[in-house]
Image (cartoon, grey):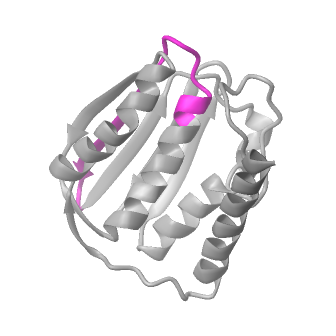
Amino acid sequence: ILEECDYMSLLVDDLLLLSRLDAHRLELERKPLDMAVFLPEVQAQVAPLAEARGLALGLGRAEGSVQADPLRLRQVLLILLDNALRYTPRGGRVQLEAFRQGRAVVLRVADDGVGIPAAHLPHVFERFYQVPRVNAVEGKSNGLGLSIARALVEAQGGKISLHSQEGQGTTVTLTF
């Protein structure tokens, strides 16, 4: 019962966040974030979970600076990293990086996990949409993570895209 209550509480929190984003009522504290400082902090936060799941969590380039709300950008990256860790089998690799591309800064979370079947790709950012699977490592999902990530990125003036191939992994790209 306690586990279900926790799950329901998180679901309500997610729905409230989406409601605030829809109504443009989420206050964002945007400031310059140096990726050389920010990404190692995020990696350090997630590293124990990756290690417990038998996965390598690598940090690639950490270049550039973005104008973003640190709490909300961290939330986006944690959603993406959680998905990557959830759908990457033991012994796999997840990579986090940021680099300059022209005037933009690109953040990328990539894994060599199970990937997403092509038929589901057009729907992955929809609310409550879940790719039917039996191979998630652990945890219960409400199907809101990627829709929250997209809304938070777009609220900060960024763009999010996802590329995946079944059996070869998934890459999510944020462009600011």
Q: Could you tell me residue 19's position as x and y percent?
A: 67, 79
Q: In this view, does 129 lie above or below 111?
A: below
Q: Could you tell me residue 164's position as x and y percent?
A: 60, 34
Q: Residue at x 65, y 25 (%)?
A: 137
For residue 95, say whether it is visible.
Answer: no
Considering every residue shown, the one lying at the far front of the view is: 2
Q: How many marks?
A: 0
The answer to whether residue 29 is left or right of residue 87 is left
Q: Which residue is drawn at 54% across and 59% down?
A: 149
Asked if the stretch drawn in magenta spans residue 61, the answer is no
The answer to whether residue 37 is left or right of residue 29 is left
Asked if the stretch drawn in magenta spans residue 93, the answer is yes
The answer to whether residue 151 is left or right of residue 93 is right
Q: 131 or 75: which is nearer to us?
A: 75
Q: 74 or 118: which is nearer to us?
A: 74
Q: Residue at x 58, y 17 (%)?
A: 89
The quadrant of the image that shows the C terminus is bottom left
Q: Which residue is drawn at 39% across and 37% down?
A: 46
Q: Could you tell me residue 63's position as x and y percent?
A: 18, 47
Q: Is residue 147 above or below residue 40?
A: below
Q: Is residue 39 above or below residue 9?
A: above
Q: Could you tell me residue 95's position as x and y percent?
A: 38, 30
Q: 104 or 78: which is nearer to us?
A: 78
For residue 163, say whether it is visible.
Answer: yes
Span highlighted in magenta in the image: 84-103
